Image (tube, rainbow, N blue to C red):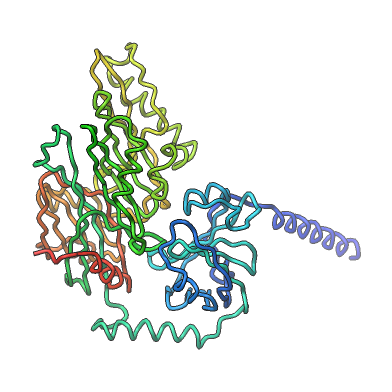
Amino acid sequence: MKRKLLLIVMILAMLFTVSCNLENTKITNKIVAPDNTKLPISGKWVIEDYKISSISSMDEETVEEYIGKEALFDKKLVAIGDDYCLEPSFKMKNVNTADYLIYQYKVNPNFLNIDEDEIQIVSVMSKEQFFYEFIKESDEKIIVNIDGVFFYLKMVSKEVEDEKIAEYYYTDKAMFRMADVGEEDMLRTGILIGLKSLDLDAKENNIEKWNYRTIFIRSYNKEIASTYEMKDIFLPRRTGFWGVKVVRENVNDKINDNIVAYPYKKTVDLNNEKKKEDKVAKGSTIKNILYAGNDYISIESVNQSNNGERFLEFYPIDNIDKGKPMKISDIVGEMGKESFLEEVNKEILSGDKEYKNSFIDLTPDEESFGLFRRNGHWVLKGRVNFVENDIYSYKNFNIKAIPPKEIVHYDELSIPWNAVKTRIPEAIDAFTSPNEDLIIVITRNNILVYLIDGGEIGDIPVEKIKLKSTEKVIMAEWAVGRYPLLWEEEFLKHEATPIK
């Protein structure tokens, strides 16, 4: 009996040792969806300091008002001052410190006094809506960027009182009652659609020119509440709302386009942007936007001085005018790069005998890729540029890699594309809302808004918006819950007009 007891004790000890070793194994560079019973950030915090970056859209007086404000982290609520989100979800990732700070915020680690080569980032979302992203220095110190200002927060309590959480829930319900919005479960949906159209009246040296506009559609409980439009691209970002436009300059018969992205709260001298472009522009380059998202932009750059070569380029929004374009491996990793190289051989070289034994160099440049619309989704395509018989040409090819959520936040179709085409044969594109209450269908001539009921498209469109000739979608950003009203309020501050 004693021997049996001793054997059992030894086995238990061995299992305990293995268990401890497993728990001590370090796992890095993986995205983790934490159990809400143990949040990556929790408790009550207070803002105690700040640093203003060069792209800040806040004045010093406004920044000072944040000092002393509380931040609350709970499985039911995350709040910073008056800004909050209910039923939050958390996502963690480990990133290279320098790469992250430079790409996202145009600052280096020294600016924030961060010595570590790797830092942990905690993203907070609610119902597919981005809230804030936090740099976690330690269990008691975090940093958050608000409108270009880095605020330092210190933990003051590990718990959040139930009364505090209840206050925000009461405020949330009261806000919708004041706005004539009914019950809490009513569907509230909004979408910003960015469009570009070829200016057919532009006669400037027969060089193409693209015009841009943004449409905002808001619905409440499956009824269209409002539709507005404005010039250029109105872009929602984690640091606030930004404007994106293409500024054209003609000097000595050399035409150059400069894509400008700027916070709406910060005054931007577009004439100065033109002067900066003049200093670096040696040839004649025109640009058009293929895709604009929260943090990244895909463009086509046309070199008029060199046979009209058309290059694909991909940049962080904050670095459009600086540095080299990003590589495909920066977006989808080494596997994406392998697909990039394989597909050019498969689709162009193997599929076309004309080029298989040609002396033309069809080696793809890893920076030559972009985002395009196809069958209701954003897809990655690469491009090979070459000259044959003194004539410039190019060929696009598909890349078998899905754009990550860091690039394209929401790109789901709750109704399959084949079902959309069967129901509306003239459809060339479609977007469905996260609430699954609306489907936006793009045809050659119109934007059609249909209701979704029981997973089926409604009989007739509830809204129809006329498209301009050649107009294409380059942006689609959804808002749900309380955000559609907030987005509309901001949209109307920037010369938006009702769509008639």
Identify the residue at the far bottom of this view: 163
Residue in the image at 17% along x and 37% along y: 208
Residue in the image at 29% along x and 21% along y: 351
**In the image shown, does 181 or 187 lie closer to the viewer?**
181
**311 left or right of 56?**
left
Against 411, is 224 above or below?
Answer: below
Against 96, is 156 above or below?
Answer: below
| Rendered location of residue 128, percent (x, y) | 38, 63
Against 463, is 393 above or below?
Answer: above
**267 left or right of 38?**
left
**351 left or right of 69?**
left
**In the image shown, does 262 or 366 lie closer to the viewer?**
262
| Rendered location of residue 321, percent (x, y) | 38, 43
Q: Quadrant of the N terminus?
A: bottom right
| Rendered location of residue 363, percent (x, y) | 39, 22
Q: Quadrant of the C terminus?
A: bottom left
Residue in the image at 35% along x and 46% along y: 297
Against 238, is 177 above or below?
Answer: below
| Rendered location of residue 127, percent (x, y) | 38, 67
**In the image shown, does 197 or 171 lie closer to the viewer?**
197
Q: Quadrant of residue 340?
A: top left
